[in-house]
Every structure is written in C-alpha cells, then in structure tokens.
Image: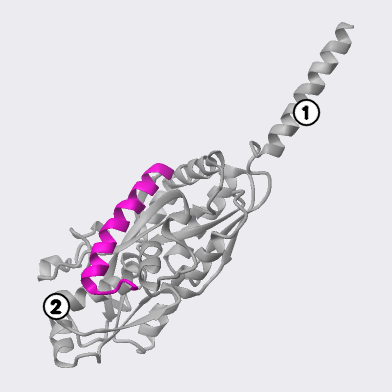
Amino acid sequence: MRKLAIGSIALLATLALVGAAAAGTAFPNKRITYNICFNPGGESDITARFQEQPLKKVLGQDIAINYKIGGGGALCWADLVKTKPDGYTIAGHNLPHTVLQPLEMGNAGYNTLDLKQIYFFESTPNLLLVRTDSPFKTLKDFVEHAKKTPGAVTVGGSGTSSANDLGTTMLNKAAGIQLTYVPFGGTGSAVPALLGGHVTALMSYSTMGIQYAGKFRALAIASDTRMDVLSDVPTFKEQGYDVVEGAYRGVAAPPGTPDEVVKILADAFEAVHKDPEVKKKMDQNGFKTEFMGPEASVALVKKKMVEYEEIMKALGRIKK
C-alpha cells in the first residue's frame, strides 16, 4: 500500500512538471528568433552578433538572427506586435525611432507602448561624418558651405523618423541652414553611399567613427561631453550648436508576452552584457553599454515620449 502511495505521489509530481512545462515555466525549450529591423552591417546587427553565442549559452537554445527591413524599422515592429506572444520571437528596437514613427507617420502599424520592453543594452550618440578627402575640415567649414548652398548639401542617415533624421533637422534649426536628409535602410547601407560620394556627409553614430576612422572624418558628436574612444572629436555644443541626440537600442517582445518570460529574457541579456568579453567589444566599437531591465526600459520610453513630442511639435513634424 505504501509503495502504491509513493508511486502515486511520483506520478503526480511528474504530471505537475509536465503541466508546468506546458504552462510555459520551462521557457525556453526551443529556438528563439531575434529579428533585426535594419540592414546587415549597422549597429543593431553588430550588437546582435556580439550577443548571439553568449545568449545561446545562457538560454541553452539556438538564437536565429533574422532580418525584417523596411520603413526605417516600422515594418519589423508592426509585424512584432502581431506575433504570438510566447517569447520565441523578439526584435531589436530603437529610440527615438519607436517614439517618432507613430508621432510623425500617424499610422506606423504599431503604437510605441505596444512593444513589450525587455531590455535596453546600449546607446550611441549621433556623429556627423564626411570622407577624409572632403574639403570640409571642421564643422564651421561645413556649415558655412551649407549656408551658401541651401538644400544642396546632402546628409545620409539610417531611416526616417530616426535619431539620424532628427539630428539633421536639429542641426538645420540650430545653424540656420537647409541640409537635405537622405534616408537609407540602415547604417549598413548609408555608409557605402558616403564612401561612393553619393551624399555629402552622414549623420551616423559613434560606432562608425571608429569603424571607418581611416576613411571618414568626424566633424562633431551630438553628446553632452566628448566620448573617451573619440576624444579628439568635439561636441556640437562646444562649437556653438545645441544638438544632443542619438539612439538607444534594446530588445522587445510582442504585447501580451508573460512577465515571467520577459524576465528570463531580460536576465539573459543582462548576463550577456556583463560578460567582460562582450563589454570589451562594445567599448572598443563605440557603444555605450546600458543596463536597463523591463521596468527601467518602460520608464525610459515614457520619458522619451514626452521629450520627443515637445521637440516634434516645435519642429512642426507631428502628423495632424
């Protein structure tokens, strides 16, 4: 009788474990798809490649990096909000893009707060770049030329309603000039345009100033203070223009994804970015590492929603 009772208890325990797994407490138990919303070669892609193997080790499952490109990231994020909320499909996402697009487009296919925040892991300030053979040696040269040729100076960047787009608009306003912004599908496709002479300059990110140090000249960085890895590049503020802008990058899940699943993913990203080797790669490539879990990420998004709405109203760029 006692053996039967013990056997029954064991059976019940097994059934409970099976039930728990079915309820999702065994997450993850299969491959996770990690969508990148921009072209290969840009900051989102570079970061994901740094994360791929460490994430696999921490989570114990394969990580499939996939590209969904279009609309400056909007296509990818619109698709994410319609995806099954089980944690097995996540996407890299950016600020200010996911705030600006719904504000400026009116219908971006998603709302900012639809994206379930998992983690923000890095940031990069805007960087104004020209080729090393450019006649513009300083920001002053660049601005003076732009004043003489309104609309003729082209500035490439990653996406519309993005940090690069907004940074260019802010420089126009601060300097009283008229630059023509040319959007690309991501930094990965914007860089060849400058290398090939198809645009005059790039409003890019700190990462590209390091990666293309021998081919591009950085005229100004849009941060409050200089970056250690680009210590010879003056800020816009130092040169008389109040332009501070850049991108935060993180990862999000579909709305309705269970909090316990989000926590597992957030803990994994935190562990990865505290790994000394990953941190070293991030620093060397011009990324500023951030450590913002779900709650801190939501707080940042809400704060930026207020800030960017004020900026966009002042610039007259909110969709009526």
Q: Nearer the viewer, residue 233 or 303?
A: 303
SS majority, magenta: helix
Q: Position of residue 137 (x, y in %)?
A: 18, 81
Residue found at x 83% / y 17%: 8
Left/right placement of residue 289 relative to residue 80 reads left
- How far from the left and from the top, in percent, is residue 291? 38, 45
Q: Pinpoint residue 261: horizontal percent, then vertical percent.
A: 56, 42
- Name the residue at 55% across, 69% down: 68
Secondary structure category for the residue under label 1: helix
Q: Relative to 301, is 42 above or below?
A: below
Are the residues flagged by discs 2 and 1 in contact, CB closer than 8 Å?
no
- 312 above or below 12? below
Q: In this rendering, is residue 247 above or below 259? A: below
What residue is pinned by disc 2?
Answer: 175
Q: Which residues are magenta?
A: 294-320
Residue on which disc 1 sits: 15
State the image coordinates of residue 170 (x, y, percent, origin top left): 22, 72
**Residue 81 in the figure: left or right of residue 240:** right
Residue situated furthest top in the rendering:
2
Q: Is residue 220 magenta?
A: no
Residue type at mark 2 is Ala
Give residue 313's quadrant in the image. bottom left
Q: What type is the residue that disc 1 sits on?
A: Leu
Report if residue 291 is visible in the image.
no
Q: Is residue 27 in view?
A: yes
Residue at position x 56%, y 68% in the image: 67
Q: Determine the CA span between mark 2 and mark 1.
A: 69 Å
